[in-house]
Image (cartoon, rainbow, N blue to C red):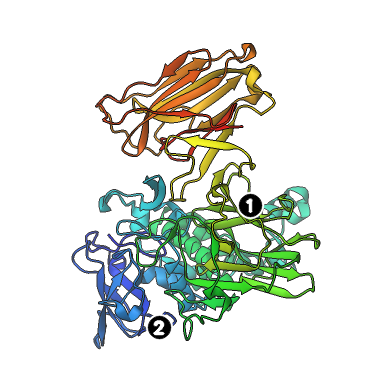
């Protein structure tokens, strides 16, 4: 099934709705990514699982034109093939992105579209064979997010074509009766308030004024006021065609539509698709005419003229990189982000900065960093990425020492917040979001002499700084949640002291004690939350003072919103409690972990008084034994795990 890039409804003949069959393709014409074309109107094929559609190459032509469609071309529509060809000319057939003709007409109505910007934005959004292009919104009710391998996937809400509601199946562009409604509105003669400024009068304000003023209550509102109801930001902005053939009476048209439009599915779908179009336009408008600044490095999307010069600094740079869920070129891309452009800055010595100005872009998925500008001690500007002057956030920096790097707040789609790491290891203030997001501390002992940043069409998705060989600290080389642990802590886990090399999921930590024995004496109970008979999903630490209570992973009832799948027959959930007498010196001394495939299916908790508890056994047996995990230090003060549901691993933090 292939879905419209704008509205999220599939292309098909099976519903016998002509508008759903009519498709335009946005595709690459020739061998360059910046030669984007839009086709004429084609008709979807007989088979819904065939992503290729024949379309006229002429933008103004249709497949059913009386004079004939002219030259045709077969275009494969994403997500028919989830991989991106590294070279447009290397593809067996042209490919691109599809729009219903009705959706395209709404999207481009009174909007000057840059096709290259649109195509690059589409390339930046995750998709797969059976998923929708993930703009970060729910297509106004047409899609939902499902979990696949602990990752969110944008899928259709409808299990079958028949399940698509009538509103979503109704043509949003050709609304039956709308033209007659416009033509039938009679002119209102009484226009005593024509001197009032309609753009400052909302209907709520008008009602309030009429309640407050008996004189005003008897007056008629002007035609200019009623006409303003059809302007952007007002009730009927989704009907721009009324301005092509203005009604005789804006008031009568407004009142008529207030009653008539409620029961028209096409009108409801128009409003839905119009909202999606405005949202996409708002995103694309930010990109149009904004270049990606910095020294260009070659990528599959953007090649440098002669390739890297071996005498240039990048030929010698060794990079320490922070990234999350960045898809490799040519690989499946159903979540995360994708690099289109790369830029770099090089300095002859560790740079001392006076200020960083961080730029942001607003998308349906939220606000992301689009680039930044570093001002050095000599007031010289060094910019990387897309600079949006109306969305800047400034970080002031001390000039006495170079910074050691940055701490980054990252979600799966990109980088949402940044703070600089000063020479003493302390963070500056944050620019952008940081609360509730996994963090990566991109830091080295020496100052920054080179920076590389990677971008999709909108935002920053990866950042690197120079490093010295063999001096990487693994604590600064992965994602952490809720924050990066302080240095000096000792880690030991069921899969070793380091996380898996795949960094899409953060390492989560919980601290139930301190090195001075604070809190440990008040620890009274450890509760293990178990999903689907034996899968360990969360560990809760309870104290005599409940305000200290904290948790690792998922704690609570496992309802339908819990993303994991049940695999065991006669599945049930449970909790296992380990009462601990912290005030008498009882402490956690070790854990034992058992895995089956990817997940933890058994956990034993042991205290220093030789008491222990165990979660329920895996019902089908496992050939793997138990892995015993001790604290590497003298005192266990916390636990850590990869943020998977259920757990992949478990470990102890000690001092």
User: Looking at the image, which residue is at 47% across and 19% down?
Assistant: 606
The answer to whether 498 appears left or right of 87 in the picture is right
| In the rendered image, the vertical position of residue 509 relative to residue 268, given as above or below | above
| In the rendered image, the vertical position of residue 629 relative to residue 458, given as above or below | above
Image coordinates for residue 552, horizontal then vertical, percent: 52, 32
In the picture, the disc for residue 433 is 1
Examine the rendering and report whether any part of residue 461 can be seen.
Answer: no
Q: Judging from the image, what secondary structure is the residue with disc 2 in?
A: loop
* Frontmost residue, 78 versus 261: 78
User: Looking at the image, which residue is at 42% across and 74% down?
Assistant: 300
Instruction: Sort mark 2 into few (<14), some (14-19) or many (20+) by Cα contacts within 10 Å.
Output: few
* Residues at marks 2 and 1, CA–CA distance in whole angstroms: 36 Å
> In the picture, which quadrant includes the C terminus?
top right
Which badge, 2 or 1, is on the more N-terminal residue?
2
Image coordinates for residue 324, horizontal then vertical, percent: 49, 55
Instruction: Name the residue beneath numbered marker 2.
Output: 32
Report which quarter residue 575 is drawn in: top left
* Frontmost residue, 488 versus 304: 488
In the picture, the disc for residue 70 is none
Image coordinates for residue 555, horizontal then vertical, percent: 49, 29
Examine the rendering and report whether any part of residue 329 can be seen.
Answer: yes
């Amino acid at each position: 099934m292939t879905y419209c890039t704008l509205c999220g409804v599939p292309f098909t003949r099976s519903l016998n709705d002509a508008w759903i069959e009519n498709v335009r393709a946005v595709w690459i014409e020739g061998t360059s990514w910046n030669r984007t074309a839009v086709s004429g109107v084609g008709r979807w094929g007989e088979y819904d699982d065939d992503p290729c559609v024949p379309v006229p190459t002429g933008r103004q032509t249709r497949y059913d034109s009386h004079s004939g469609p002219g030259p045709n071309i077969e275009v494969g529509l994403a997500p028919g093939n989830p991989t991106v060809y590294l070279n447009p000319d290397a593809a067996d057939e042209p490919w691109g992105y599809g729009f219903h003709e009705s959706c395209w007409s709404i999207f481009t109505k009174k909007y000057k579209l840059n096709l290259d910007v649109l195509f690059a934005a589409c390339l930046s959004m995750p998709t797969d064979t059976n998923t929708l292009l993930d703009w970060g919104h729910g297509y106004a009710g047409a899609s939902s997010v499902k979990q696949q391998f602990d990752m969110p996937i944008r899928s259709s809400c409808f299990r079958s074509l028949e399940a698509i509601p009538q509103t979503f199946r109704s043509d949003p562009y050709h609304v039956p009766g709308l033209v007659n409604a416009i033509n039938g509105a009679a002119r209102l003669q009484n226009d005593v308030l024509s001197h009032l400024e309609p753009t400052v009068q909302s209907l709520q304000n008008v009602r309030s004024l009429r309640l407050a003023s008996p004189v005003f209550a008897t007056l008629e509102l002007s035609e200019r006021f009623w006409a303003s109801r059809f302007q952007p930001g007002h009730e009927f902005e989704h009907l721009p065609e009324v301005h092509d053939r203005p009604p005789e009476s804006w008031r009568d048209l407004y009142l008529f539509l207030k009653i008539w439009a409620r029961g028209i599915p096409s009108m409801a779908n128009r409003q839905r698709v119009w909202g999606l179009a405005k949202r996409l336009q708002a995103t694309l408008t930010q990109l149009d005419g904004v270049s990606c600044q910095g020294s260009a490095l070659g990528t599959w999307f953007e090649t440098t003229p002669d390739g890297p010069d071996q005498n240039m600094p990048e030929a010698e740079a060794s990079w320490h990189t922070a990234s999350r869920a960045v898809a490799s070129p040519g690989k499946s891309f159903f979540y995360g982000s994708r690099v289109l452009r790369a830029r770099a800055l090089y300095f002859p010595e560790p740079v001392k900065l006076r200020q960083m100005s961080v730029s942001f872009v607003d998308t349906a998925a939220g606000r992301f960093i689009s680039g930044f500008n570093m001002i050095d001690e000599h007031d010289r500007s060094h910019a990387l990425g897309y600079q949006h002057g109306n969305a800047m956030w400034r970080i002031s920096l001390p000039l006495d020492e170079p910074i050691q790097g940055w701490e980054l707040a990252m979600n799966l789609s990109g980088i949402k917040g940044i703070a600089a790491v000063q020479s003493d290891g302390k963070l500056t203030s944050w620019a952008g979001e940081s609360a509730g997001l996994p963090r990566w501390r991109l830091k080295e002992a020496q100052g920054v002499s080179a920076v590389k940043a990677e971008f999709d069409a909108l935002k920053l998705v990866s950042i690197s700084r120079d490093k010295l060989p063999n001096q990487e600290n693994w604590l600064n080389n992965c994602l952490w949640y809720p924050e990066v642990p302080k240095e000096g802590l000792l880690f030991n886990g069921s899969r070793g002291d380091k996380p898996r090399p795949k960094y899409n999921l953060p390492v989560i930590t919980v601290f139930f004690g301190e090195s001075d024995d604070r809190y440990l004496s008040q620890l009274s109970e450890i509760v293990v939350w178990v999903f689907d008979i034996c899968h360990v999903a969360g560990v809760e630490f309870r104290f005599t003072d409940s305000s200290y209570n904290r948790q690792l992973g998922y704690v609570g009832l496992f309802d339908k919103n819990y993303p994991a799948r049940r695999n065991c027959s006669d599945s049930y959930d449970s909790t296992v409690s380990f009462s601990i007498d912290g005030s008498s010196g009882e402490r956690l001394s070790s854990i034992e972990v058992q895995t089956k495939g990817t997940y933890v299916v058994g956990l034993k908790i042991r205290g220093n008084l030789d008491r222990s508890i165990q979660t329920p056994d895996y019902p089908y047996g496992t050939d793997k034994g138990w892995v015993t995990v001790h604290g590497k230090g003298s005192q266990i003060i916390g636990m850590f795990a990869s943020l998977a549901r259920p757990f992949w691993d478990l470990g102890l933090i000690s001092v």
